[in-house]
Amino acid sequence: MYVAIDEVFSALAEPTRRKIIEALKNEPKAVGALVTELEISQPTVSKHLKVLREAQLVRMAAAGQRRIYSIDTSALEDLVHWCADLVPVPEAEEQQAGHQANSQLATAANPTAQQIGRGVGRGLEQVTGRAQEFLERLPRFGRRR
C-alpha cells in the first residue's frame, strides 16, 4: 500500500497534474477539452495524464478516437485512509464518552448547569454546521467495490 501512496504523492506534487484533477472533479472530459480549459499543449496534457493514470488517479475510456478521462477514486481513498490513521484521537473525545452519563445526571439536578449546557449545545451546533459546510465543499469520492 505504501508504494501506491508514494506514487500518488509523487503524481500530485506537480501543480499541472493537480489542475487536471481539479478539471476532472465534476465530470469526465476528453483530452481536447482539458487542453482548451487549461490552456496547455496537447502533448503536455497527455504526458501528465499518463503519470496520473499510472498512479491510478485517473482512468481512461476510449470513445472512437477520443480518450475520455475521469477521476479514479480508489487511490485517493487509500490516501485518505492512510492520512486518517495518522491523526490520533484526542484524549478529550475518549474522556467525553466516559463522562457523558455523569454530566447528564448532574445537568438534570442543576438548573444553572442546564442553562450552561444549552449554551454549549448552541455553540457546538454552530461549529458542527461550519464543519458540515466545509465537508460539503470537498469532492465526493465513491467507494469501489
Image: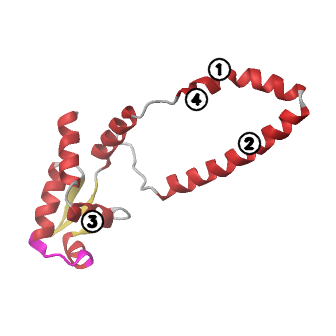
Q: Which mark is nearer the camera, 3 or 1?
A: 1
The earlier-in-sequence mark between 2 and 4 is 4
Q: Which mark is nearer the camera, 3 or 4?
A: 4
Query: Label 4: which residue?
Result: 92
Q: Quadrant of residue 5?
A: top left
Magenta stretch encompasses residue 40 = yes
The earlier-in-sequence mark between 3 and 2 is 3
Q: Position of residue 66 (x, y in %)?
A: 17, 70
The earlier-in-sequence mark between 2 and 1 is 1
Query: Label 2: which residue?
Result: 120
Q: Which amino acid type is shown beneath numbered disc 2?
A: Val
Q: Position of residue 24 (x, y in %)?
A: 31, 64
The earlier-in-sequence mark between 3 and 1 is 3
Q: Which amino acid type is shown beneath numbered disc 3?
A: Lys
Query: Could you tell me how far apart the alpha carbons at marks 3 and 4 are, in whole angstroms?
Result: 38 Å
Residue positioned 17% across, 61% down in the render: 49
Q: Which residues are magenta?
A: 37-43
Task: Judge by depth and name the residue closer to the eye, 142 or 137.
Answer: 137
Query: Label 3: which residue?
Result: 19
Query: Could you tell me how far apart the alpha carbons at marks 3 and 1 are, in whole angstroms?
Result: 45 Å
Report the disc number at residue 98. 1
Residue positioned 31% across, 67% down in the render: 23
Query: Could you tell me how far apart the alpha carbons at marks 2 and 1 are, in whole angstroms?
Result: 18 Å
Query: Could you tell me how far apart the alpha carbons at marks 1 and 4 are, in whole angstroms?
Result: 10 Å
Report the disc number at residue 138. none
The earlier-in-sequence mark between 1 and 4 is 4
The earlier-in-sequence mark between 3 and 4 is 3
Q: Which amino acid type is shown beneath numbered disc 4?
A: Ala
Would you say 99 lies left or right of 49 here?
right
